[in-house]
Image: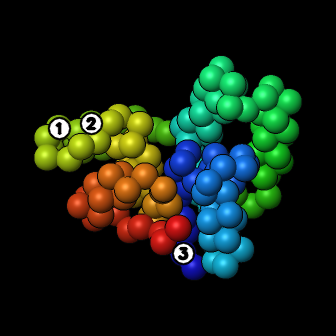
């Protein structure tokens, strides 16, 4: 398996028992990919957990456990990517095409995956379609 860039939709499902948790875990077990994780996707993960706590679908203690597990996971051979000005510029270019239904965070994740030469792993179908249209490989999660 090649390198795979995980967006927040996949990362959250790896650490929270949601409807896609089993699918995310099975993908990792079956493929043993080299996982690329950006600082931006890590921040999105934190935002998603924080939101779940605010809307009371996740307890504070569950979030703290997920944060600890996530932080430990990041030290286990994950390829860390720092978001660069060039990534933001690439995302801006995707958004300016005007033919893709992208939001800034999604465009930025696609740009990061592209720069890393990694397949994008996402559970967000519209994002997957946009990545494909931009020539970014997809991981079959």
Q: Is residue 140 above or below residue 96?
A: below
Mark 3 neighbour class, 10 Å CA radius: few under 14, some 14 to 19, many 20 or more: few
Label 2–label 1 contact, CB within 8 A = yes
Q: Is residue 70 left or right of residue 113?
A: right
Q: Name the residue located 71 percent from the left edge and 74 percent from the top edge.
A: 29
Quadrant, the N terminus: bottom right
Spatial separation of the CA atoms under disc 2 and disc 3: 27 Å
Residue 10 in sight: yes
Mark 1 neighbour class, 10 Å CA radius: few under 14, some 14 to 19, many 20 or more: few
Return the residue nearer the eye: 71 or 141.
Answer: 141
Badge 3 element = loop
Q: Name the residue located 64 percent from the left edge and 46 percent from the top edge.
A: 12
Q: Is residue 85 above or below residue 51?
A: below
Q: Name the residue located 48 percent from the left edge and 56 percent from the top edge.
A: 122
Q: Earlier in the sequence, mark 3 or mark 1?
A: 3
Residue 2's disc number: 3
Spatial separation of the CA atoms under disc 2 and disc 1: 6 Å
Residue carrying label 1: 96
Spatial separation of the CA atoms under disc 3 and disc 1: 30 Å
Badge 1 element = helix
Q: Return the x and y of residue 58 as percentages of the image width and height.
A: 73, 32
Residue carrying label 2: 92
């Amino acid at each position: 398996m090649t390198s795979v860039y995980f967006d927040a939709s996949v990362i959250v499902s790896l650490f929270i028992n949601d409807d896609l948790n089993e699918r995310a875990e099975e993908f990792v077990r079956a493929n043993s990919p080299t996982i690329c994780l950006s600082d931006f996707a890590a921040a999105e993960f934190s935002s998603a957990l924080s939101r779940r706590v605010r809307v009371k679908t996740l307890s504070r203690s569950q979030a703290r456990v997920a944060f600890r597990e996530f932080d430990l996971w990041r030290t286990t051979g994950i390829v860390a990517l720092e978001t660069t000005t060039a990534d933001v510029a690439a995302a801006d270019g995707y958004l300016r095409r005007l033919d893709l239904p992208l939001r800034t965070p999604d465009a930025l994740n696609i740009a990061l995956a592209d720069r890393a030469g990694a397949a994008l792993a996402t559970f967000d179908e519209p994002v997957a379609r946009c990545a494909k249209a931009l020539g970014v490989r997809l991981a079959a999660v």
